[in-house]
Image (spheres, rainbow, N blue to C red):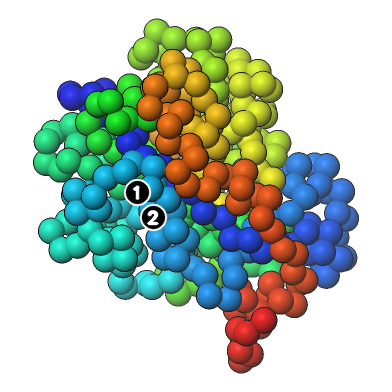
Amino acid sequence: MKPSQPVGIIGWGAYIPQYRIKVNTIAQVWGAQTERYTEGLGIEEKAVAGPDEDTITIAIEAAQNAIKRAQIEPREIGAVLSGSESPPYAVKPTGCTVAEVIGATPNILAADLEFACKAGTEGIQFCMGLVSSGMIKYGMAIGADVAQSAPGDDLEYAAAAGGAAFIIGKLDSNAAAAINASTSYVTDTPDFWRRSEQPYPKHGGVFTGQSYFHHIINAGEQLMQDLGMKPKDFQYAIFHQPNGKFPEKAARELGFTSEQIRVGMLVSRIGNTYSGCIPLGLSAVLETAKPGDNIFVVSYGSGAGSDAFHIIALDAIENKRELAPTVQDYIERKEYVGYACYAKWRKMIIGLETKR
């Protein structure tokens, strides 16, 4: 899929909570072997939302950083699309609150998107279409999560918090990168789910991994076939990171090298931020890429599907990096908490105040 009118990323912004919990801290509580996660999945620690943070606050921080880099008036934004699988309200859109806080209301489209971990990338696709058609001048796509996991489940070791936002507009001299093309690959594969009113998601174990590789590889191969490109034509590649090992395997199977995925893998150090995972990985690459660099992106969302993109860094990218905190800045800003504090904040302990 190519937009009828060229579009690009005008600004981007990330946000990661400062709190962390180490994998060995979680493992000690459940009597598990730390090495199973640190060595088996390449996970050392994860980001934890503070007692006053949720998906909305994370989305707002990321959105404000994106506006700083875009250097546009918020009222020029015609749509705010927020993707998440852990919104604080079952019935009340995150997009409206974000739009209000950044000063983009009231003449704006606001909507929440859901497709497990790829809700952020489908927001980018929607904004591409709205901008390319001329319906809006700029659109904002957000992927943010305060990831959910049952206590003691394997997911608890990686399910983290964070997010990023992108402002999409028509291609001009203010664009940091061009979004050349996108494609999607979707099937009805129930590898991960959470029914209404259930607090934690369930997953298919090894089957979830099989679904991940099937969808990512098919979407990635289709994109390169459509464009007549090969892995060697890209300077960077970004894959969804449920852990530190899956992206490495997906990259190898598609023909990418460890060097091509190194920068995009930066966010694996703070866990799986679900809908924020690919947006954070892309943010890290945009903070490093040089004009002319080709960027390959493939997301994954359980249920299941993948979105693939070809993005090209442009000249304006170098003047935008210092206008807002980087992913590396947020990763380095950290404070460790214990399991009791983490469990209280995540409301795994009921009936206690959330003060630290």
Label 1 element class = helix
CB-based contact (under 8 Å), mark 2 and mark 1 = yes
Q: At 18% from the left edge and 32% from the top edge, which residue is drawn?
A: 132
Left or right position of 85 against 264: left
Task: Give the percent coordinates (x, y) of residue 285.
Answer: 53, 32
Figure quadrant of the C terminus? bottom right
Task: Give the percent coordinates (x, y) of residue 184.
Answer: 37, 31
Q: At 57% from the left edge and 45% from the top edge, which residue is drawn?
A: 327
Figure quadrant of the N terminus? top left
Q: Quadrant of residue 72?
A: top left
In the picture, the disc for residue 64 is: 2
Task: Give the percent coordinates (x, y) of residue 142.
Answer: 38, 50
Label 2 element class = helix
* Mark 1 closeness class: few <14, some 14–19, many ≥20 residues within 10 Å: many
* Mark 2 closeness class: few <14, some 14–19, many ≥20 residues within 10 Å: many
Q: Which residue is mark 1?
A: 67
Q: Is residue 178 in sight in this rendering?
A: yes
Q: Is residue 83 above or below residue 122?
A: below
Q: At 71% from the left edge and 76% from the top edge, which residue is drawn?
A: 341
Q: Quadrant of residue 10?
A: top left
Q: Is residue 14 above or below residue 315?
A: below
Left or right position of 124 against 262: left
Q: Amino acid at mark 2?
A: Gln
